[in-house]
Amino acid sequence: MKALLEFQDHLQKSRRIVALVGAGLSVSSGLPTYRGTQGLWKNFNMIDLATPDAFYIDPGLVWQFYSWRRFNALKAKPNKGHQAVSQLAQIKGNDYITITQNVDGLQSRSGHPKHNLYEIHGSLFELKCTSFTCNYTDRDNFTNPLTPALADTEYEYDSKRKRRDLDTDQSISPQFRPVKELAELDLPSCPACNELLRPGVVWFGESLLLLVIDQIDNFIEEDHVDLVLVIGTSGTVYPANSYVDRIKLKGGKVAVFNTDIDQDVLEGKVSNTWGFKGDAAETLPLALK
Ligand code: BJW
Ligand code: ZN
């Protein structure tokens, strides 16, 4: 309780704030995280699904994975944690940014203003042409399924899940299971040049959009950031994980919202750091009010 009051006092006094968001925020909306026992990478190695090489080797497999992810994200609804973040973003305006690593679009759908939201790993609902000579990009494409062949993937997955739900009478962590081999002709193609389209997400080894990185760097460097909220992320992926240390080094305070938090943080032994353990969809609305 003391920690909560101290945090809320600092939140009130903070002029410039950053929120760094990860997959944990969407868990209570029904979407899995990446790592850990319930994570997306449990059954599949990310090297086989979320790298440019994976797409080059088997675009059909990778498209089935992303088609399934689009389908689940479209069914999911933003939760109270997304809403609390969006409200803070509305109130703080230009002195605030949300950096979300999530590609599910839920933060935006919860009413977050566009000008201070950065989706640094892209979006499941963006499509990009794979040709180097064509810069076709389709944003906010919510078509589902994207091609008739990808429809079968979703149907197969969904019917399996319903059956298993009925058997066990409990909710289960969704897992991706590709159902068939797909040829390039079955996959989304570019309306401008007819080459293969790819999901507009950032894979390992790929550069983040430099314009976005520059804007975030400017926000962090141009003036002192008083507070960084670290929400539902394992902090394993660069460059997202570097922002917290950069802010902390310059004297900013840190508040972590996660189901898994170091005991030292919880006991107040880490300087300038608060920890709020639990589902971020529940802890954020309480802490940010
Ligand atoms: C809850 C909860 C609840 C659960 N409530 N909390 C060696 C080789 C090649 C590259 C590298 C290398 N070493 C380093 C690199 C760089 C690499 C990297 O960082 N690798 C590390 C793994 C070592 N990074 C890159 O390659 C990046 N590009 C780059 O660096 O380019 C150079 C450059 C930089 C800057 C400017 C210009 C150029 C690109 C990284 C792209 C990451 N892409 C992915 C996939 C996106 C597409 C897709 O979705 O399929 O992004 S990977 C995946 O990890 C996804 C996520 O956004 C990201 C972060 O994951 P997140 O959100 O933290 O999830 P989890 O599962 O890890 O954690 C969930 C947390 O929630 C846990 O803590 C739980 O406890 C918690 N939780 N339930 C609150 N209810
Ligand atoms: Zn094209």
Image (cartoon, helix red, strand yellow):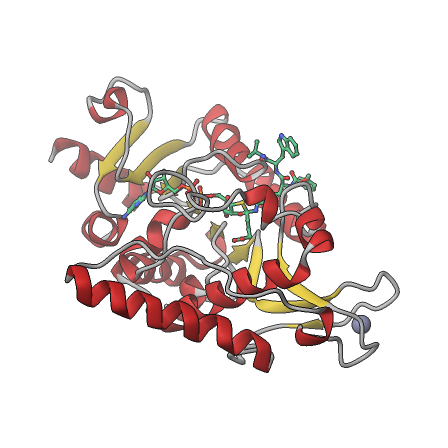
Q: Is residue 71 left or right of residue 240?
A: left
Q: Position of residue 207 (x, y in %)?
A: 70, 45
Residue at figure coordinates x 66%, y 49% from the top left: 54
Q: Give the residue at x 60% y 64%.
A: 63
Q: Report whether 16 appears left or right of 182.
A: left
Q: Which x, y percent locates residue 275?
A: 26, 33
Quarter of the view holding residue 256: top left
**Quick check: can you spot residue 16?**
no
What is the quadrant of the N terminus in the image? top left
Q: Is residue 40 above or below residue 182?
A: above
Residue 164: x, y in percent?
25, 63
Judging depth in this view, the residue of 30 and 234 nearest the camera is 30
Instruction: Please count the marks in the image.
Output: 0
Q: Residue furthest right?
A: 133
In this view, the residue farthest toward the left is: 1
Q: In the rendered view, would you say 7 is above or below 266? A: below
Q: Quadrant of residue 88?
A: bottom left
